[in-house]
Image: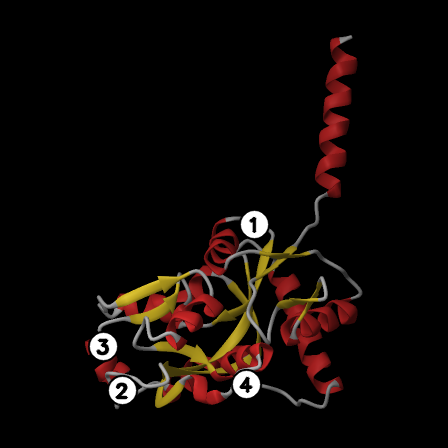
Amino acid sequence: MKRTLLIGTLLSLSLTLSAQPSLTLLSHELVPFTYHHDGQLDGVAVRLIQQIQDELGETYPIRIYPFKRALALTKLEPGYALFVTHWAPEREPLFKWVGPLFLNKVIIYQPPSPRHKLKSLDGLRHLPRVGVVLGNADDERLTREGYTNLVRYQTVDEALQRLVLGKIDAFPVGEMVLDAILEQRGLSHRTVTNSGVVLHESWLYLAFSRDQDDAVIARWQSALDRVRLKNGKGSLPPHQDRTSYQAAQQDPADQ
């Protein structure tokens, strides 16, 4: 009897494990990259990831979480890949990377009629309140550089709402993201003020858990490269070239 129960338990466990996907793709709500439209997951990043999976002949589930949670899962647990993720030197050893997927230019925006006009990146430190998304690359960087005026929000949309109302004095956000949110809400660019100050310009990637086999990473990278060629996009700088590119984009004071 005990032997029968043991065999049944082991069989049940085996079936459960076999039903689990070998890879779970994670993303976070961020237009135009990932968002829900008419109840369906959509966005330029979602469509690109789906094209890569078609190229591979594989399908993996996509789960949507707040960015900080998705980043922590990918960093700490096996079998995850997160898109879209800002590459930075300090993040390099924490994940395995496939990309680049998109170029992200982050500009510092201010309220429609800013009380404290930003003229340089150095001035950001002296503003009363600077909005950031909790745990994202901008939060990580400004925290690391000792900023004490940060106000953290769960989403870009929440931070942008506070900016429009003048509740914060500045908010760094990607040009593509801002344009998409304003269009989605039917708002003009006069709703915010473009300070003209660039926080950084960097590549966005697909970041895999560190335990992922190198052969899998190579297959995904090769599939991405083929998709880009099919789409007529041409090739982007290879993995090993992005460090020099990023350095060239940084403000001299940050190097």
Report if the CB atoms under discs 2 and 3 are less than 8 Å apart.
yes
Q: Amino acid at mark 1?
A: Pro
Disc 2 to disc 1, C-alpha distance: 43 Å
The type of residue carrying mark 4 is Pro
Residue at the image point whose x is 35% and y is 62% from the top: 152
Q: Are marks 2 and 4 in contact (CB under 8 Å)?
A: no
* Mark drawn on residue 118: 2
- Identify the residue at image location x=68%, y=74%: 48
For residue 23, side relative to residue 142 (left or right): right
Find disc 3 in the rendering and name its residue: 127
Q: Is 82 displayed left or right of 134 in the figure? A: right
- The residue beneath circle 4 is 237
Q: Quadrant of the C terminus?
A: bottom left
**Cα separation between marks 2 and 4:** 32 Å
Pick the quarter of the image with the N terminus: top right
**Residue 184 image point, x, y percent:** 59, 77
Q: CA distance from mark 1 to mark 3?
A: 40 Å
Q: Residue at x 76, y 13 (%)?
A: 3
> In x, y percent, where is residue 40?
72, 64
Closest to the observer, 167 or 222: 167
Amino acid at pointer 2: Leu
Alpha-carbon distance for marks 2 and 3?
8 Å
Mark 3: few, some, or many residues within 10 Å (few <14, many ≥20)?
some
Please determine whether, in this image, residue 66 is positioned above or below residue 114.
above
Q: Are marks 4 and 3 in contact (CB under 8 Å)?
A: no
Residue 78's disc is 1
Looking at the rendered structure, the kind of residue marked 3 is: Leu
Q: Quadrant of residue 219?
A: bottom right
